[in-house]
Amino acid sequence: MANIPIWPGSSSFASGSSTPFGFYDSDSEFQIDADKFALFASQRLGYPIVDIELQDKNFYTAFEEAVTTYGNELYAHLAAENYLTFEGAEQSIASANNSLINPNMATIIRASEQYGVEAGAGGNVTWYSGSIDLVNGQQAYDLNSWASSSLNLSGSNIEIKRVFYEAPPAIQRYFDPYAGTGTGMTQLMDSFGFGGYSPAINFLLMPINYDMQKIQQIEFNDMVRRSQYSFEIINNTLKLFPIPDGNPSKLFIEYILKAERNAPYVDTGGTDVITNISQVPYDNPTYSTINSIGRQWVFEYALALVKEILGYVRGKYGNEVPIPNANAKLNAPDLLTSATDDKNKLLERLRAYFDSTSKRKLLESRAEEAKHIQDELRNIPFTIYIGWYVFTK
């Protein structure tokens, strides 16, 4: 096997050829710190007392991976923290790395639209209207037959949301004995634009609770003394109460198509939007913008990676290497164990640090701080001011 050179004790970073991916090669601070880290890591591993069976590229590779890992952990935290804001936005939006996120409720509103559909107060499913020809004396109507003949649909494909079968509004049956008696009051109110109120005279001369009591009296009378207007739908059969009589015309209903409500995808108009967390526009970090706290973590994590690489290299030769008059014992198992333990602890520490700076944790901390301040202020005695007046003549 060829005699492969190992770490000579110094290095010189070359942009474009020193790291596998070159994510940060153009960053001048990364270039400087790459050589500093190589010296730091080699000395932490025992150089120059012992040889380090690595080359400068091994140090640079570990350093690049540590920076990338730091960015991945940071932006995974931010992506999860702000995903409700990002979901549904166009994928073509600019990188979020150095952007202050403006929260919105688009995803929450989109999720709540389903309740608006069921309540008839909006939503994302169209309500259609239709009518059924009423027949004198006929109480039950087959909705399957109606849907097939009128809509060319099966009755199981639609869902009735509202049936307009109710008594005429009580306001239409409101009687005021003082209206239209020749006093000209109705015409007078019309001239002021009050003719559309119920009735125009009472709008000015009676309190509003008088109108409300009169309407309730009419409706309560219908409920007790007359057959109340209602309906029931059982097994796609609509039954009306009371039975239509006289000269009935049409019964209007509103319905939805079940296929539209069951559609799982949001219509985005063909625009590519963010649909999962892997599409949130975070890039690799800019090394020069990482503060000293982050860089210290990067150095420690990169050192753990170097330990791992060196452990694999030394593990190739077994536990002992023969030298003149003795055997050199290699520490590959110790390096690999230490590297694994260090990486796990560093990742746990970083995630705990990011979690402590989440919006929820910061708000909890602020609330706790305010509580302690209030407790402290309660221990401060109140000052009693004694004043006096000076009378002069």
Image (cartoon, helix red, strand yellow):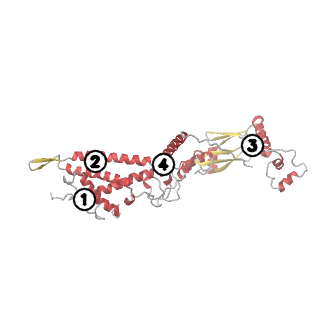
Measure the alpha-carbon separation of dots 2 and 3: 81 Å
In contact (CB < 8 Å): disc 2 and disc 3: no
Q: Which residue position holds label 2?
A: 339
Please, which residue is most extreme toward the top here?
A: 224
Say which quadrant the N terminus sits in. bottom left
Q: Residue at x 25, y 51 (%)?
A: 44
- Taking the image as shown, residue 256 lies to the left or right of residue 366, namely right
Q: Position of residue 2 (x, y in %)?
A: 15, 59
303 relative to 80 in the view: left or right: left
Earlier in the chain: of badge 4 and badge 2, it is 2
Crowding at dot 2, Cα within 10 Å, few <14 / some 14-19 / many 20+, comes out as: many
Q: Which residue is mark 3?
A: 167
SS for tag 3? Answer: loop
Q: Position of residue 171 (x, y in %)?
A: 78, 45
Vertical relation: 132 (above or below) 267: above
Residue 234 or 254: which is nearer the viewer? 254
Residue type for callout 3? Ala
Residue 75 position within the rendered picture, expressed as x and y whole percent measured from the top left: 42, 53
Q: Which mark is residue 56?
A: 1
Which label sits in the foreground, 3 or 4? 4
Q: As rendered, which of 278 and 296 lies closer to the eye?
A: 296
Of label 3 and label 1, which has the lower sequence position? 1
Asked whether the residues under the numbered discs 1 and 4 touch, taking CB atoms below 8 Å apart as contact, a structural biologist would say: no
Give whichever of discs 2 and 3 has the lower sequence position.
Answer: 3
Which residue is rendered at x = 29% and y = 57% of the image?
A: 37
Sequence-wise, which precedes: disc 1 or disc 4?
A: 1
* 10 Å crowding of disc 4: few (<14), some (14-19), many (20+): few
**Labels 3 and 4 touching (C-beta < 8 A):** no
Whole-number angstrom distance, CA of label 3 to CA of label 4: 54 Å
Label 1 sits on what residue type?
A: Asp
| CA–CA distance in space, label 1 to label 2 | 19 Å
Mark carried by residue 359: 4
